[in-house]
Amino acid sequence: MNRYLLIFFFAGVLAACKSKPSKTGDTDQPLTYEDFEQLFPQSALPYKLSAELLAEKTPDSVRLKAAVIKQFLTDTLGKSRFPKSDVPKYYPLQYVPGATMNFFVVKASGKTGTLAYLCFTDKKGKYLNSMLAGHTADKDGTVLYFSLDSKYVIKTSTERKLTASRSALKEDFYMINPDGAATLIMTNSNEPGPGQLFNPIDTLPRKQKFSADYKSGEMNLVSIRDGDEPKTFRFFISFSKDNGTCKGELSGVGRYTGTNKGEYQDKESACGIAFQFSGSRVNIREIGGCGAYRNIKCFFEGGFAKKKK
């Protein structure tokens, strides 16, 4: 009788092993929704997918078969973003169970780029919708990443390179409706609008005597902010002359050389700027060649009026 019990025991173990899904979803048999959940690492809220994390290489051993994506999500996921010749591979990044719906983060990686999709299903496993929530750097250096907070608010962050030393950030906040539709509820952005300047030091402290914004027209700015020491100051200069054909931009840390004088010397070139302050103005002039930061026929020079805070 013991022999028969052992036979039944091993038969049950073999059946259980056959019923378990593979870790990659690489199976010819349809998976259950619970099987699909187990293919993803599970996380509690809040959750964030950074651009750096998305760019990391994912082992091909965890790749999801296209049939699994089709069964539980959609077979068109990400395909519109890739050329027809570039068939993306899909990887499970995260599963986040929610109160009324579940969230799955899927990485779509091809030769032309890497994307992240946040997919929504109801609690029974019915696919509702998905949204592009991340991508690695575009040709212009723009990246997209997202976070999901404890109230199920999704924040997507688009970071765009403006110059080699500064970038603009746009944050969009979404709520997900019961049908899976995403509703935009708020946008924050420090991107310059048409005809506007982007001041990268605008939010820095301005308690020192000459810390202020000085302008000459709409597109010419000298911005002064507090330095780390009483005798230093941070600055940002941007100008546009001759209908935009002559432009210049420079930022750095200067040093006060007198009661109302300051000076900046670039460590990587001969470029230098002299600052002359008064109660309501600042005058600047080059004291070294700053051609690396401007067009050849114009200079960092002129007077700028203090702008009210």
Image: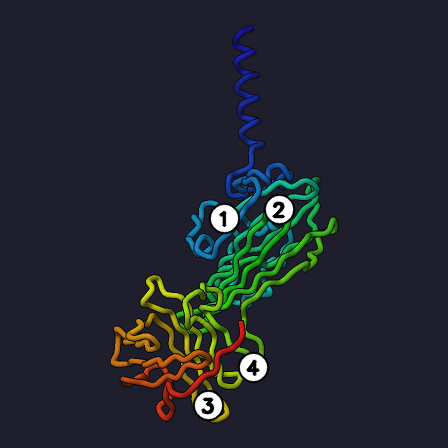
- What kind of residue is marked 1? Arg
Q: Which residue is mark 3?
A: 241
Q: Earlier in the sequence, mark 1 or mark 2?
A: 1
Q: Earlier in the sequence, mark 2 or mark 4?
A: 2
Q: Nearer the viewer, residue 275 or 163?
A: 275
Residue lying at 71% horizontally and 55% vertically, measured from the top left = 181
Q: Nearer the viewer, residue 280 or 105?
A: 280
Q: Nearer the viewer, residue 134 or 16?
A: 134
| 10 Å crowding of disc 1: few (<14), some (14-19), many (20+) | some
Q: Earlier in the sequence, mark 2 or mark 3?
A: 2
**Mark 3 secondary-structure assignment:** strand
Residue lying at 68% horizontally and 42% vertically, measured from the top left = 125
CA distance separating discs 2 and 3? 51 Å
Residue 4 in picture, x, y percent from top left = 56, 11
Q: Quadrant of the N terminus?
A: top right
Q: Which label belongs to residue 195? A: 4
**Mark 1 secondary-structure assignment:** loop
- What kind of residue is marked 2? Phe
Numbered disc total: 4
CA distance separating discs 3 and 1? 55 Å
| 10 Å crowding of disc 4: few (<14), some (14-19), many (20+) | few
Of tags 2 and 4, the one toward the viewer is 4
**Mark 2 secondary-structure assignment:** strand
Q: Nearer the viewer, residue 257 or 104?
A: 257
